[in-house]
Image (tube, grey):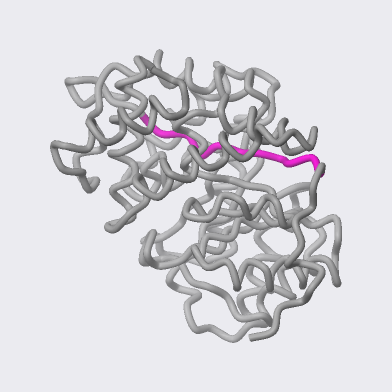
Amino acid sequence: MNLPMANTFRRFGRTITGMSAMLLPFTEAGEIAEDAYSACLLETVQAGLTPAVNMDTGYINLLTDAEKARVLNLTKQTLGATPFVAGAYIEGKEGDIATLYRREIALIQQAGGTPILFQTSRLHNRPPTEVVETYAQAVADVPTAYAFELGRMFAPNGEIWSTEIVQGILSIPQIKGMKHSSLDRVIELERLALRDSLRPDFQIFTGNDLGIDMSEYGSDYLLGLAAFSPAKFAERDRLWQQKDTAYFAVADALQHLGNIAFRPPVPAYKHSAAIFLNLLGKIPTSKTHPRSLERPLWEREILTSCAERLGLC
């Protein structure tokens, strides 16, 4: 496959917009560790990244409606007027799809957040015009929203869209950007080329934790990996903008961490994140949601090596 040459060149010195998909930490009793979560939110903002709550990293597919609302309220209480992004997740719910999205969006707006729309399996293999019209109806009353294109290695409700659907999403003025999580560089480069030709101000947020250097080619990012160390991601971004060659050592160390944490089974990366943040003293335990996949006992040892390489312990 031939790639558009404009997107095979690194864009040295560009300013990168970074978002971190927040991990939801738990206590030994299995309760949400609220104080630790608030501290992680503040650390993310202080580093210069935008927190993204109720995402896959925050177990959105496993939370009850009450738990999702609790996370939103805690985020609002912690951040005040500071911007954040939150997932609008409707999988498993019955009713008109656009109406379901609007209900989730309203809750996010009430908390002061900007919605990012998770895909639903109910739109899988539907005609492109139907998918695009559903999204257009869902966001018609909001000034800003984001779409989320998610590979099924992360969750069964995800779907890598056809080019026609992506073109349609780009045509919706309220949707200012899209997180792309295929873990496939070629597809993401195609998304960037389409963006550059149709709507240059539209943001493509890479969700490729196995290729975080996609930010070098024009992507911004919304990454679960960024939750491991928002400060290191901010340092990496700053060095890139300054065209400082120290960038490469930081980027390589972060990618090494990503390769380990996001190995198959990919959804178990959330346990890797919990172990990593716990060994750094950021959260009280390495517990995950009780229905989330877990890593082997030796995970802590290998993640300690990753933290040492990053100079974090």
Q: Which residue sits furthest left?
A: 297
Q: Residue at coordinates 25% horizontally, 38% vertically from top-left?
A: 289
Q: Residue at coordinates 65% horizontally, 39% vertically from top-left?
A: 18
Q: Position of residue 115 (x, y in %)?
A: 62, 46
Q: Nearer the viewer, residue 254 or 157?
A: 254
Q: Residue at coordinates 32% horizontally, 52% vertically from top-left?
A: 267
Number of callouts:
0
Q: Position of residue 201 (x, y in %)?
A: 85, 55
Q: Which residue sits furthest front?
A: 245
Q: Residue at coordinates 33% horizontally, 55% vertically from top-left?
A: 266
Where is the C terminus found, in terms of image quarters?
top left
Q: Is residue 15 magenta?
A: yes
Prevalent SS, magenta region: loop
- Asked if residue 13 shows in the view, the reply is yes
Vertical comparison of 33 with 111: above or below:
above
Q: Position of residue 175 (x, y in %)?
A: 74, 57
Q: Position of residue 259 (x, y in %)?
A: 40, 50
Q: Which residues are magenta?
A: 14-24
Vertical comparison of 48 with 169: above or below:
above
Vertical comparison of 24 with 209: above or below:
above
Where is the N terminus found, in terms of image quarters?
bottom right
- Asked if residue 110 shows in the view, the reply is no
Q: Is residue 31 magenta?
A: no
